[in-house]
């Protein structure tokens, strides 16, 4: 089931049309995405390689021959998390947050007093994931598709359950951890976390097609439609939905071009001070494949890549980069089959980074 999820090392390695601007060297990538759309594994795919070359395959809507738009907007799901973690690390660099301080120092009584800011960023807090308790399955998603959730409601869902483990002693992906981080940013800046992301990242980098929709249900700009099967197996268009249940964990909308610009700046150290840049990709024995908002993955060929994936009803995406400057962004729109084209993703990453 495609929900907002992290790109852990295990997930990446196990799951991991016509080209308008594609160079011959990318013909293998074009072939792979064509195979994926023709087989029914996806309705449409956009790919951006190293910030320059764009490829696409498939269609923008079911029953239409209209191609997927170049640099179309799409829901990025959990690729929202690196934007949020970047703001938290910026605040740490400004001395406003101690990464190893308990969250309750800044937000009294909100979560278990042992949970630190770092543990939220690295998914080692033990905090239950509210998304596990919401009716996000296709059979029942219609009940909350347009519902607006508050951050406190989402946190209350998580804190009504016991911790999964003692903070810092394990790792379990928690969207709620990033909801709390959004609340933390708001507390320290005096404005909603969305404002901090916009002022600190989106505007300086001129990410003109990147938006934080809050409770807005529409996707702005040219975009492909995403689909999902309902309880009866009927395919429905879920392009319009209220992403507030994802919030700071997965609400954002962007393009492959904007994601490439953001990732290039982030990995080049243009958004963080040196100390926080080191923290960004630092892993631990408890969290061997995840830094502070970025996955750190070694591919089978030995190449190390950094980035994140994102999934939300109708859409899936990847944002990946290597230390040598190579980058790869991918947007997939679901045709309603709810397929999991993990082998194709792994093949695409190996084709580019290996």
Image: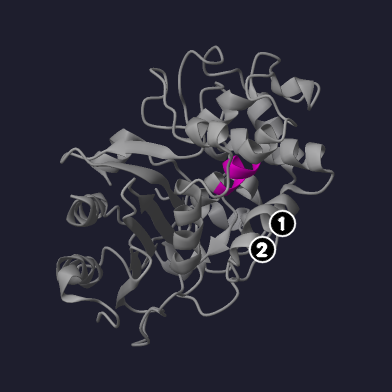
What type of secondary structure mainly makes up the magenta span?
Answer: helix
Horizontal side of residue 344 vs 54, given as left or right: left
Up/down of 192 relative to 216, above or below: above
| Residue sitting nearer the eye, 242 or 299 | 299
Horizontal side of residue 333 vs 354, given as left or right: right
Residue depicted at 61% across the width and 54% down the height? 143
Asked whether disc 2 touches disc 1, contact meaning CB atoms under 8 Å apart, the reply is yes
Neighbour class for label 2 at 10 Å: few (<14), some, many (≥20)? few
Q: Which residues are magenta?
A: 83-87
The residue that label 2 is drawn on is 203
Residue 264 on image: x %, y %: 45, 55
The answer to whether residue 312 is seen in the rendering is no
Residue 13 on image: x %, y %: 24, 40
The residue that label 1 is drawn on is 199
Residue 95 on image: x %, y %: 73, 30
Up/down of 125 relative to 143, above or below: above
Q: Which mark is residue 33?
A: none
Tag 1, which secondary structure? helix
Residue 41 on image: x %, y %: 26, 63
């Amino acid at each position: 089931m495609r929900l907002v999820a992290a790109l852990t090392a295990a997930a990446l390695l196990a799951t991991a049309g016509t080209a308008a601007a594609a160079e011959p060297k990318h013909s293998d990538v074009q072939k792979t995405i064509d195979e994926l759309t023709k087989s029914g594994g996806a309705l449409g795919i956009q790919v951006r390689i190293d910030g320059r070359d764009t490829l696409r395959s498939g269609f923008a809507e079911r029953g239409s021959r209209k191609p997927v738009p170049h640099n179309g907007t799409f829901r990025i799901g959990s690729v929202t998390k690196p934007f949020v973690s970047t703001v938290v690390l910026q605040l740490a660099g400004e001395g406003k947050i101690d990464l190893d301080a308990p969250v309750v120092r800044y937000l009294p009584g909100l979560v278990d007093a042992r949970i630190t800011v770092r543990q939220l960023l690295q998914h080692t807090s033990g905090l239950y994931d509210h998304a596990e308790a919401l009716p996000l399955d296709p059979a029942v998603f219609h009940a909350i598709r347009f519902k607006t959730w508050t951050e406190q409601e989402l946190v209350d869902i998580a804190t009504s359950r016991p911790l999964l483990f003692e903070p810092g002693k394990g790792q379990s992906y928690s969207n709620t951890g990033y909801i709390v981080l959004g609340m933390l940013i708001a507390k320290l800046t005096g404005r909603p976390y969305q404002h901090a992301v916009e002022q600190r990242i989106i505007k300086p980098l001129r990410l003109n097609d990147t938006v934080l929709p809050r409770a807005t249900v529409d996707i702005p700009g040219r975009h492909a439609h995403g689909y999902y099967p309902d309880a009866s197996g009927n395919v429905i268009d879920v392009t319009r939905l209220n992403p507030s249940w994802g919030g700071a964990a997965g609400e954002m909308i962007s393009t492959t071009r904007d994601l490439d610009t953001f990732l290039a700046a982030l990995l080049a150290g243009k958004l963080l001070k040196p100390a926080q840049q080191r923290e960004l990709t630092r892993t631990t024995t408890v969290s061997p494949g995840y830094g502070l908002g970025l996955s750190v993955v070694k591919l089978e060929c030995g190449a190390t890549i950094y980035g994140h994936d994102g999934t939300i009803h109708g859409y899936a995406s990847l944002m990946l980069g290597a230390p040598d400057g190579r980058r790869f962004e991918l947007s997939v729109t679901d045709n309603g089959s709810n397929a999991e084209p993990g082998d194709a993703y792994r093949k695409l990453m190996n084709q580019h980074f290996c």
